[in-house]
Structure formats: structure tokens, C-alpha cells
Amino acid sequence: MHWTSPESRSRSLYERARKIFPGANTRQQIWMSPYPPYLASGRGLWVTDVDGHRYLDLTGNLGVLIHGHAHPLVNAAIAEQLEHGTCFALPTEAELRLGGLLCGRVPGFERLRFTNTGSEAVAVALRAARAFNGRSRIARIEGVYHGSDDLAAVGTDSSPDNWGTDPASTPRYPGMPAAILDQVLVLPANDLEATERLLAKAGDTLAAILVDPAPLRCGFTPLDSDYMALLRDLSRRAGTLLIFDEVIAFRLGFSGAQGRFGIDPDLTALGKIIGGGMPIGAVAGREDVMAVFGNELEAARVPASGTFTANPVSMVAGDAAMSLLDSAAFEHLEHLGHAVRERAASIILAAGVPAQITGIGSLFCLHPHDRQIRDYRDYHRSREEVAIMGRIHRSLLEQRVLLTPNGSGFLATVMREQDLEAFFTALPAALATAFA
Ligand SMILES: Cc1ncc(COP(=O)(O)O)c(C=O)c1O
């Protein structure tokens, strides 16, 4: 039965949710109109809804599940840990295994600290930068999503009404304190001249520049290499720390995005794939900067701790998932990503509609317009374009292919090219419906 049918099980769950959650949901990012299908299970590339329909899942829970759902080796690691307990108020060896694996992969990860989410990792990294150099302001790129931390969220949802000529420090929600907005300088992606001018004006007031090297809100298109090099150079000269947000971008290579693009940030925020499907985040980087965390007895200048931090279930799941991600796995993901983008681009061309697909590595994003995307302003969608994207998403879902509502997709090591046929078959009708 269709999930929107009045007799569907999804409908009855939605009706219950309306009485429990504001807006009937507890996670806005994945909401769709009139309400989404509710899921019952997932295995490999497939998820099944509560009415028994199977969908090809190209979301992998927004980039978490790089080996698909319920991978047997990850599940086995979790199951074994469950037998030994789920969380303790003392450290375990499991945190050393995952922490050691991550530090072993990236030369700049001299020390590492776990958190529970990517948002927390970004917040903690910013706090570390502030404490390290005793400055409070930060800079970040316009429009890029860095999670829920207030400081990192300034300038995330700008629109033509309020973004200004030089990017404005726009609030994420009504009532966001002006004192927070004042702390954030917003930079235009890939605009060397304006960025150089704005950073020169900021002088030595900035604690850090926060950068996602391949942001979703630029279509997962990497920032220009000379732009990244400029940020590295100017931050170093001003004594400002460069923080990479690799919560998603870490999946771009064995040594993360920084290895792929040849940039050495001072700190890196991690999340998503490193937890193997369990909640996680981490901040890693220079030993002298990370020393601000210290421990409870000596040298701790920045508090960073949490009830569930480094819980062994997340640690063993992450260790299992990351151990599976060897060079061959990355090669496979590159190949798949290339194939998806090429095939979808030819379908869009044949459809003759103003749409496009962009991305890098195992990341892709469909857009309801054909503007060249170099920054958030190019990516930004008008109301009409948002409606078109909604129709593409909805039509794909009707044809049992799950993308995120904004059109982004995340590939998994367990996919083969032929598994993606369902997507290629569904795309022409989705485009035709959306642009009709
Ligand atoms: C680039 C980036 N940074 C930070 C976050 C926040 O991570 P989390 O949702 O685990 O808090 C996200 C989440 O999607 C993200 O995409």
C-alpha cells in the first residue's frame, strides 16, 4: 500500500507522531510533504518501509553508512560488544583502537578527541581554537552547513533578501544573539580577492577559519585549490587556525579530504562514517593545539567530555567500518561516483531540462537548475526550484529510490554499478514530472 494512503501503516504512525512531536517529526532535515514513509528495516543497499515496500537507499543516513545497512562485520563487532556492556565511566581499549586507526591514517592527526556527533566535534574544535590563541572571533564560508552549534551556524541559511554584497553574518533562527553574529566573519567561497580583503581587515582577531573543503551547499564541488591554499597561507600568517570540517568529506580518501587536496589544516572535525552507523564525532589535529583539552587534573583549559563519549559500541562499530575502508574500497567508490555522475548527466541531457548533477568521489548532488556552481549563491534555490527538487525527490521515491530531499546522494562500498540501474531507470520520469 502506498505510504500516503489513508489505510497505510505509515499514515497511522504519522498520525501518532503528530500528537507527540512538533511538526510530527523529530528530525527536520529528512522531512517531506505531506509526511515521509516510515522505515522498518535496512540491509545492504535496501531499506523497507512499514508497508513492505523496498527502496534503493542512496542516502546511507546522510552519508553515514559507507558500507550500507547492517553490514555483517560491523554488526558482529556491535553484537560482541553488547555482550560486554554498552558504556562505562572508565576508558576502554576500544577507543584506543579507533583513535589509533584514525591517527595512523592522517599525518596531521597528532592527537584526537572523540565526541558524540559531528556538530559537537565542530563546536569543540572552535572552542579549542579560541582557547589556544585567546581570540574569540571565527570565519567561515557562506551557506555551508556545519551542524547545530550556534557559532558555526551563523551565515548558514542566507538568502538573496539578507546575504548582502560581502556575505552577511545572518542568524540561523529568530532571536539568535547579536553577540554571536558579531563573532563570525562570513567569507565568499572561491572569491580570492574578497576573501583576502575581508581577512586583511580582520587582521589577527580570528581564532579560526572553519572550512568544509567540498561542501554540499556548493554541490559537493571541492573549493578551488588556489582558494584552499590561500586560506591556509593567510590563516598561518595571521596566527589563525585552519579547521577542516570533514564530517562528510573524510570519505573522500584514505587520508580524508586533506590528503586528497594536499592541505594540512591545524584541526579537523570528523563524524558520520567513523562510527560505522553508531553516533560519533571527533576532533583531531596538532598536538600543541589539542593540548588545551588535557585532563581533569592538569592542563585542561577546554572542557570536552560527555556521558556517551567514546562509548565502546560506537568505537567497535567505527573500528570495523573504518578497517573495511582500504585503498581498494576507495578506488571502487571513485569508480562508482564517476559512473553515477556520468550516467545521470547523460540522462539529464537527453531529458532536455535545466538540471545538473555535481559531486566528487562517492558524493553526488542533483540540482533543479543548470547554473554553474562555484559557491552557495549559485547553489541557492529559488522557491520554484525548491518545488522542482521536491517533485524530483517525490517521483524517485514513488519509483522506490531514496535520495535526500535536497537531492544529495552517498554511495556505499557494497554497491555495484548494476545496483544503480533502479536510479537510472527512475530518473527520466522524475525529471519529466518535475519540469512539466
Ligand atoms: C559538513 C557537516 N558538518 C557537521 C555536521 C553535523 O554533524 P551531526 O549531524 O553528526 O551533528 C554535518 C551533518 O550533516 C555536516 O554535513
Image (tube, rainbow, N blue to C red):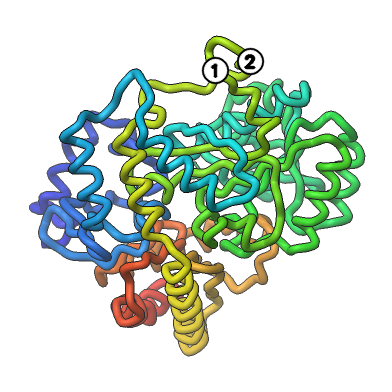
Q: 107 or 63: nearer the eye?
A: 107
Give how far across and how far down residue 302 sits, in percent. 61, 19
Whether 183 is drawn above or below 30: the answer is: above
The residue at 24%/35% (across/down) is: 18
Question: Residue furthest toward the bottom?
Answer: 350
Three-letter residue code for mark 2:
Ala
Q: Mark 1, residues whose alpha carbon is within 10 Å: few (<14), some, or many (≥20)?
A: some
Mark 2–mark 1 distance (CA, rounded to whole Å): 6 Å
Does 88 sit left or right of 4 as displayed? right
- Quarter of the image holding residue 59? bottom left
Query: Mark 2 highlights which residue?
Result: 299
Q: Which residue is mark 1?
A: 295
Instruction: Please give the name of the residue rendered at 65% of the width and 71% of the height, measured from the top-left corner.
Output: 371
Residue 271 position in % (x across, y down): 47, 44
Residue at image point 38% right, 44% down: 275
Residue 143 in sight from this viewpoint? no
Q: Is residue 244 visible?
A: yes
Q: Quadrant of residue 333?
A: bottom left
